[in-house]
Image (tube, rainbow, N blue to C red):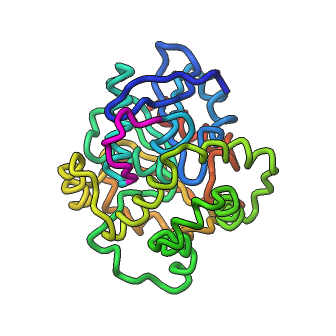
């Protein structure tokens, strides 16, 4: 991947990788938890070679991205992630882009696509509509689904915070294995990404994120208006390609109809066999091809 760049954007100094021509169609590739920009190490070159301007940022709490002020709450809530992406687009002077991501990064992309559709030329979203419905967070799911979320319940407790702080690599490596059971990643691949979890704000941002989504922690007041808009579960009107992994250890694949009412524009939903939760790193060519489909529309 290319040498990292840095830019002040909103409340952050965002560290990001950029490749491809400056005048190409802008594409933002957004990583998830617990991953980093190396999830797109093989996707970025494909897009850059096709003429896209590719930007892959570290999310708040990851890698070299830093908060500009010690006073800013270390929030990992969905509104903050979306606001960070929008602020980065503004800082780079990019009025409109194709947004692609999974997990936390997919949520950021969905937030921007839903609330600021004029800024989104197209959306690639793993796990489809990724905006949290916090009002219904305490409604229980089927036991088969609930047990996959053990880490979220773990992070709700101070024992979970202490466990993540004590051994970030052990916790996150276990999640990699459970979430992508058919992906044979190497220790080298894991360590390359795990360095991003040494960010001094990683634990605080992660814990706040998993508590806020269950209404167990207050959000940053700066994002209250955005959270109120997201509470209405706004539909996504931009052209979209959505994916599920057939072997995703976090969220089982669902049919397109499951959230069809959340997409009012053209949408194609696809279930990818043999893929877990980290789709762009597991099948980079498939992910890149979807992005290029939207670039060409």
Tell me: residue 280, above or below residue 181.
above
Tell me: residue 52, above or below residue 124.
above
Quadrant in the picture for the N terminus: top right
User: Viewed as shown, does residue 182 lie left or right of 15?
Assistant: right
Instruction: Name the residue furthest bottom.
Output: 143
Magenta stretch encompasses residue 73: yes
The stretch of residues the image draws in magenta is 66-76
- Give the number of marks: 0
Q: Residue at x 40, y 37 (%)?
A: 67
Tell me: residue 139, above or below residue 296.
below
Closer-to-camera residue (242/72): 72
- Position in image of residue 82 (x %, y %): 35, 44
- Position in image of residue 2 (x %, y %): 64, 22
User: Viewed as shown, does residue 246 lie left or right of 182?
Assistant: left
- Position in image of residue 171 (x %, y %): 65, 63
Q: Residue at x 31, y 62 (%)?
A: 261
Magenta stretch encompasses residue 8: no
Q: Quadrant of residue 122?
A: top left
């Amino acid at each position: 991947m290319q040498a990292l760049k840095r830019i002040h954007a909103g409340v952050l100094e965002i560290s990001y990788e950029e490749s491809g021509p400056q005048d190409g169609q802008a594409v933002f590739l957004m990583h998830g938890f617990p991953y980093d920009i190396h999830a797109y190490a093989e996707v970025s070159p494909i897009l850059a070679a096709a003429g896209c301007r590719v930007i892959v940022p570290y999310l708040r709490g990851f890698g070299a991205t830093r908060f500009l002020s010690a006073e800013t709450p270390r929030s990992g809530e969905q509104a903050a992630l979306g606001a960070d992406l929008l602020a980065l687009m503004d800082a780079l002077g990019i009025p409109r882009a194709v947004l692609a991501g999974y997990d936390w990064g997919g949520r950021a992309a969905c937030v921007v696509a839903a609330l600021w559709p004029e800024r989104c030329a197209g959306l690639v979203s793993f796990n489809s509509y990724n905006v949290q419905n916090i009002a219904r967070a305490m409604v229980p799911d089927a036991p088969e689904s609930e047990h996959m979320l053990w880490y979220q319940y773990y992070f709700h407790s101070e024992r979970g915070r202490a466990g993540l702080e004590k051994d970030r690599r052990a916790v996150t490596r276990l999640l990699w294995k459970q979430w992508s059971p058919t992906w044979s990643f190497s220790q080298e691949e894991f360590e390359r990404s795990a360095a991003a979890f040494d960010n001094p704000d990683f634990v605080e941002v992660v814990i706040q994120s998993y508590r806020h989504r269950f209404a167990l922690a207050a959000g940053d007041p700066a994002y209250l208006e955005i959270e109120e808009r997201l509470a209405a579960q706004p539909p996504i009107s931009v052209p979209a390609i959505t994916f599920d992994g057939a072997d995703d250890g976090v969220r089982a694949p669902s049919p397109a109809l499951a959230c069809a009412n959340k997409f009012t524009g053209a949408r194609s939903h696809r279930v990818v066999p043999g893929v877990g939760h980290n789709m762009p790193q597991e099948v980079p060519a498939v992910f890149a091809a979807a992005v290029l489909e939207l670039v060409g529309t």
